[in-house]
């Protein structure tokens, strides 16, 4: 039982949770950059008709999905698992969610800036 909860053992429940937590913190720092890019795009598009978003729908959908998850969605998803998942499985689910959203967050700021550039060109 000691290895399962040992804070110094990377494969313990604590070690795996801490790893997922650290990855999520890094992803949220990247998301802050995406938020700045989104604010620039949103301000730029504030008085544009909906049709002007053509070509930027996917980046908008990605941003809005990740924004919701960053604000509370990941907690909601994990809370849904708490009542019926063993601790080990719960940590695996958390790590899977963190890694999946971290991949979506990587490069999001650049995608938003690119979408703004594409809209600006039209």
Image (spheres, grey):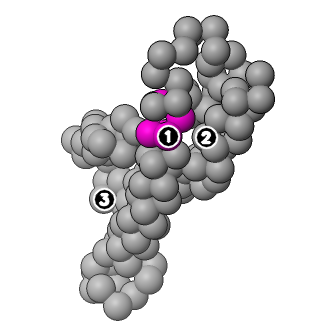
Residues drawn in magenta: 38-42
> Which residue in the rendered view is the most extreme toward the bottom?
8
For the C terminus, the image quarter is top right
Q: Nearer the viewer, residue 50 or 1?
A: 50
Q: Answer whether residue 97 is visible to the viewer in this image.
A: no
The image shows a total of numbered marks equal to 3
Residue receiving disc 2: 112
Viewer-side residue, 34 vs 92: 34
Is residue 30 shown left or right of residue 113? left
Which circle, 2 or 3, is nearer the viewer?
2
CA gap, disc 2 and disc 3: 37 Å
Q: x%, y% of residue 22? A: 40, 71
Residue 121 image point, x, y percent: 77, 29
Tell me the CA gap for discs 1 and 2: 9 Å
CA gap, disc 1 and disc 3 = 41 Å
Q: Secondary structure at mark 3?
A: helix
Tell me the tag on residue 87: 3
Residue 44, compared with residue 53, is above or below; it is below
Q: Select label 1 or label 2 by which is in front.
A: 1
Query: Residue 71's spot in the image, x, y percent?
Result: 30, 42
């Amino acid at each position: 039982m000691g290895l399962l909860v040992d804070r110094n053992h990377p494969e313990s429940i604590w070690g795996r949770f801490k790893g997922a937590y650290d990855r999520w913190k890094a992803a949220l720092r990247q998301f802050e950059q995406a938020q700045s890019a989104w604010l620039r795009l949103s301000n730029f598009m504030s008085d544009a008709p909906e049709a002007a978003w053509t070509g930027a729908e996917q980046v908008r959908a990605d941003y809005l999905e990740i924004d919701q998850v960053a604000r509370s969605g990941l907690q909601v998803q994990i809370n849904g698992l708490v009542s019926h998942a063993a601790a080990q499985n719960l940590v695996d689910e958390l790590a899977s969610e963190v890694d999946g959203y971290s991949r979506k967050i990587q490069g999001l700021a650049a995608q938003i800036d690119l979408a703004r550039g594409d809209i600006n060109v039209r």
